[in-house]
Image (cartoon, rainbow, N blue to C red):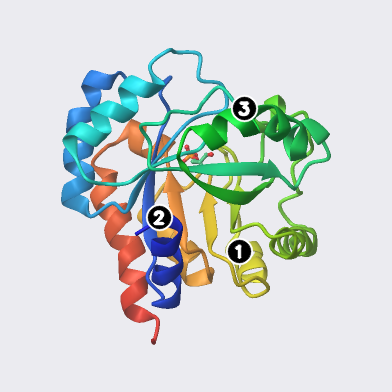
Amino acid sequence: KGIYQQIQEKKLARQKSFAVLVDPDKVQPDQLEELTKLATDAGVDYFLVGGSLVISNHLDECILAIKEQCDIPVILFPGSPSQVSRHADALLYLSLISGRNPELLIGQHVISAPFIKKSGLEIMSTGYMVIDGGAPTTVSYISNASPIPADKNEIALCTAMAGEMLGMKLIYMDAGSGARKAITEEMISNVAANISIPLIVGGGIKDPEKAYLNCKAGADIIVVGNAIEKDAGLIREMSAAVHAVSKVIPG
Ligand code: 1GP
């Protein structure tokens, strides 16, 4: 079964998912053993692998180490066209629909299309929306595009609606890695109520309570990177909080 089909089926069943972001720049492949063990025990649904920069040279190595140690699907979350590895299971084919930088809307896709197609990866077109996280993040600087202001719910919802109507399979709302302020539940619920494709939310989520509230507001997949890098023990609580929402929402 493809990853996207799995994501859609979970959405239909109102099941929430928890994804751990692994930035190859911040982790050595030999540190992954503990992480994959914790993630397996905690019932983590996906690993997202990527970062805005990826200066290091061990993307393949990182993914292979994860694949060797557990069965959790690996989804690439590439910050640039060079971050493609055929060892992953799927790839978020991100178009930065919140920005007006043509390179990140379509330019880099044109350049990378032939080798991405050849990779054999499952490609999931994703409307990527960067939301202001209270201070400049790497993604807001590197993308050379303004993020959506944190309180402009209507801009976020119109952007997500446009993304869905353009044929995107997923919407990813991101306050940026290490964001000072995570996306508000109000913005998440506004967007979730107006789209029918799965909604991924990440950036600056520091505690299980925020992960829980985001899911209640309508997020389907919660992504956490930084908080887990600082305290890997949070994986269990975060995963439990996300999965608890599936149980309280009436089916
Ligand atoms: C960033 O959404 C991800 O693109 C995760 O952000 O590292 O702040 O959890 P954090």
Q: Looking at numbered disc 3 in the image, what kind of residue is underneath it?
A: Thr
Inter-mark Cα distance, 3 to 2 = 28 Å
- Respond yes or no on whether mark 3 lies under 8 Å from ligand 1: no
- Respond yes or no on whether mark 2 lies under 8 Å from ligand 1: no
**Residue 3: image tag:** 2
Query: Quick one: 209 or 49, which is closer to the camera?
Result: 49
Crowding at dot 2, Cα within 10 Å, few <14 / some 14-19 / many 20+, comes out as some
* Residue behind mark 1: 188
Q: Could you say where residue 151 lies in the image, as x and y percent from the top left?
A: 74, 57
Q: Is residue 53 left or right of residue 28?
A: right
Inter-mark Cα distance, 1 to 3 = 22 Å
Q: Is residue 250 visible?
A: yes
Q: Is residue 48 left or right of residue 35?
A: right
First in sequence: mark 1 vs mark 2: 2
Q: Nearer the viewer, mark 1 or mark 2?
A: 2
Q: Total number of numbered labels?
A: 3
First in sequence: mark 1 vs mark 3: 3
* Residue behind mark 3: 138
Q: Could you say where residue 199 lies in the image, as x and y percent from the top left?
A: 55, 61
Q: Looking at numbered disc 1 in the image, what kind of residue is underneath it?
A: Ile
Q: Is residue 133 visible?
A: no
- Quadrant where the C terminus is found in the figure: bottom left
Crowding at dot 1, Cα within 10 Å, few <14 / some 14-19 / many 20+, comes out as many
Q: Could you say where residue 87 lies in the image, as x and y percent from the top left?
A: 35, 32
Judging from the image, what secondary structure is the residue with disc 1 in?
A: helix
